[in-house]
Amino acid sequence: MSDQTIPRTAVLYDGMCVLCVKSVRLWQRLDWRKRLEFIDVQAWERVQRRFPQVERSAALGAIHVIAPNGALYTGYEGVRHMAHHAPLLAWLTPILHLPPIAWLGRRIYGWIARRRYAINRLFGRPVCEDACRPPNRP
């Protein structure tokens, strides 16, 4: 089976978030087998057509990773699933499932996700106030 016939895992990210965009660039370098397909949530009509099960506010609040079989992973679980596909990080996958690591990973991911627009300001990037901010987020 060639690389082109292997189904890819979709990764939904916020293209208006500097942290998200920088993270995607890093993941693209780590994904030299091209198993991940990165899709900007800001192209919502495209996302909605392809993944009708995903809600816009949820997709703006955390990374969404959709496996070829349709399984959906969000937040830390999504990052953990992505690591499985990156040759340099695949060995970490079992460690990322250990209860203390998973507990800490979920909290760190959630803390950063809730504050990412404030972090964007630290980088001097404008913040998309209305079009991309999830409801009830600081």
Image (cartoon, rainbow, N blue to C red):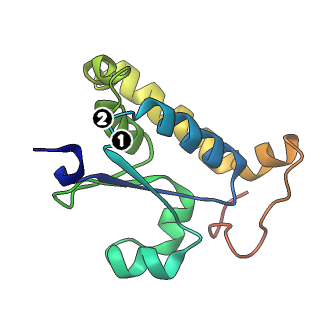
Q: Is residue 102 left or right of residue 23?
A: left
Q: How far across and down, in percent of the image, does residue 68 sit?
A: 21, 56
- Work out whether mark 1 precedes mark 2 in sequence or the reverse, and give the earlier one: 1
Image quadrant containing the C terminus: bottom right
Where is 103 relative to 121, above or below?
above
- SS at mark 2 in the image: helix
- SS at mark 1 in the image: helix
Q: How far across and down, in percent of the image, does residue 70 sit?
A: 20, 61
Q: How far across and down, in percent of the image, does residue 46 sit?
A: 45, 78
The nearer-to-camera label among 1 and 2 is 2
Q: Is residue 58 left or right of residue 126?
A: left
Where is 15 relative to 104, above or below?
below
Image quadrant containing the N terminus: top left
Which residue is at 55% across, 44% downward? 24
Distance, label 1 to label 2, CA atoms, is 13 Å
Q: Residues within 10 Å of mark 1 (few under 14, many from 20)?
A: many
Residue 90 or residue 74, whichever sits in front: 90
Q: Residue furthest left?
A: 1
Query: Which quadrant of the figure has residue 71?
Result: bottom left
Q: Is residue 49 left or right of residue 17?
A: left
- State the residue position of label 2: 85
Query: Which quadrant of the figure has residue 99?
Result: top left
Which residue is at 35% across, 30% downward? 86
Q: Amino acid type of disc 1?
A: Glu
Which residue is at 34% across, 75% downward? 50
Residue 59 or residue 47, whichever sits in front: 47
- State the residue position of label 1: 77
Q: How far across and down, in percent of the image, does residue 54 sit?
A: 38, 71
Where is 4 relative to 89, above or below?
below
Q: Amino acid type of disc 2?
A: His
Q: Residues within 10 Å of mark 2 (few under 14, many from 20)?
A: many
Residue 129 or residue 65, whichever sits in front: 65
